[in-house]
Image (tube, grey):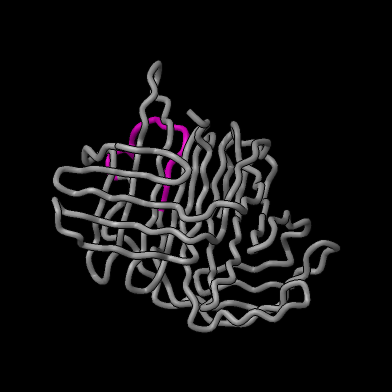
């Protein structure tokens, strides 16, 4: 990976969850400052001071981190990546917007063992997820939601998008349920009907998606880009309980409560 364009960023987000719900996420990014790696555990977020202490590939991730505030050793392997059938952004990818989103795997199988600050964590039979962002800036206001399991995975982003002199409230959502995909997006006339820290509702034609955040008490600060510099801060809750319901008219297609969803909420309270 290489990012040679000034005032731009590129990053990939790797999420790993154990059967018991321990969450370990890694953000591998490039910006004006060069390579940066951030690590989010269930308890805290860390900035990796020496990026040579981590090795990331399509097959997995290896850790040999030994710094004062964080020690991780071991490896996690990836198998059976589940790529979306189509681009998550559709034709919006070709518009001059400040941040573009990629989904590399809605869910994949993970295995391995890590020693994290003297605690042994098994990721055997765990769940993985992988996405990326690139552009000039992170949106000023946005939310992001993800929950990944082998039979039912969802990822959602809603953001204030500047387009010239105008701003739009853009949305994109992909649900993979068993072997079927359901999509919501500004590009297919999906509308945000409700937006808060506790409840999000999207509607597209006869389909309605409702997400209820059941607890959002633990957020960790992460660095984010502005004009290619990692000078802003966002906040992520890596593991919280949430429920999402997909309906077609009055028929419930999916009703799932996920105990270990992930959530970022950066909209100003109205």
Quadrant in the rendering for residue 107: bottom left
Picture layout, residue 1 above or below residue 153: above
* Region rendered in magenta: 90-102
Number of marks drawn: 0
Q: Nearer the viewer, residue 221 or 92?
A: 221
Estimate the x, y position of residue 166 in percent, counting from the top left. Answer: 38, 19
**Could you say where residue 76 lies in the image, as x and y percent from the top left?**
58, 77
- At 67% from the left and 51% from the top, the residue drawn is 35
- The reply, left or right, for residue 9 in relation to residue 211 is right
Q: Is residue 259 magenta?
A: no
Q: Which is nearer the eye, 242 or 169?
A: 242
Q: Residue at x 31, y 50 (%)?
A: 210
On the image, the x and y values in percent for residue 265 come to 51, 43
Q: Residue furthest top?
A: 165
Instruction: Locate residue 154 relative to residue 75 in the image: left or right.
Output: left
x then y, percent, for residue 45: 69, 55
Report the quarter where the N terminus lies: bottom right
Q: Left or right: where does residue 210 sit relative to residue 104?
A: left
User: Considering depth in this image, is 55 or 219 the residue closer to the camera?
Assistant: 219
Q: Can you tell which quarter of the image residue 189 is in?
A: top left
Q: Residue sitting at 73 percent across and 64 percent down?
A: 52
Residue at the (53%, 81%) spot, across then down: 111
């Amino acid at each position: 990976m290489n990012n040679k364009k000034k005032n731009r960023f590129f990053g990939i987000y790797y999420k790993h969850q154990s059967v018991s719900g321990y969450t370990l996420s890694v953000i591998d990014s490039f910006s004006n400052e060069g390579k940066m790696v951030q690590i989010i555990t269930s308890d805290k977020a860390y900035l990796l001071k020496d990026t040579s202490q981590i090795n990331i590939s399509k097959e997995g991730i290896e850790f040999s981190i030994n710094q004062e505030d964080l020690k991780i050793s071991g490896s996690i392997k990836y198998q059976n990546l589940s790529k979306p059938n189509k681009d998550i952004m559709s034709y919006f990818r070709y518009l001059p917007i400040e941040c573009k989103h990629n989904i590399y795997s809605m869910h994949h199988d993970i295995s391995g063992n890590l020693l994290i600050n003297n605690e042994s964590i098994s990721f055997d039979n765990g769940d993985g997820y992988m996405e990326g962002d690139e552009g000039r800036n992170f949106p000023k206001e946005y939310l992001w939601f993800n929950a990944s399991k082998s039979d039912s995975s969802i990822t959602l982003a809603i953001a204030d998008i500047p387009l010239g002199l105008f701003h739009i409230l853009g949305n994109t959502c992909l649900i993979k349920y068993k072997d079927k995909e359901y999509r919501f997006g500004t590009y297919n006339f999906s509308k945000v009907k409700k937006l808060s820290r506790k409840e999000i509702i999207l509607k597209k034609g006869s389909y309605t998606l409702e997400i209820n955040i059941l607890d959002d008490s633990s957020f960790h600060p992460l660095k984010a880009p502005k004009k290619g510099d990692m000078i802003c801060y966002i906040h992520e809750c890596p593991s919280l309980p949430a429920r999402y319901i997909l309906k077609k008219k009055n028929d419930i297609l999916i009703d799932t409560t996920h105990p270990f969803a992930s959530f970022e909420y950066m909209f100003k309270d109205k």
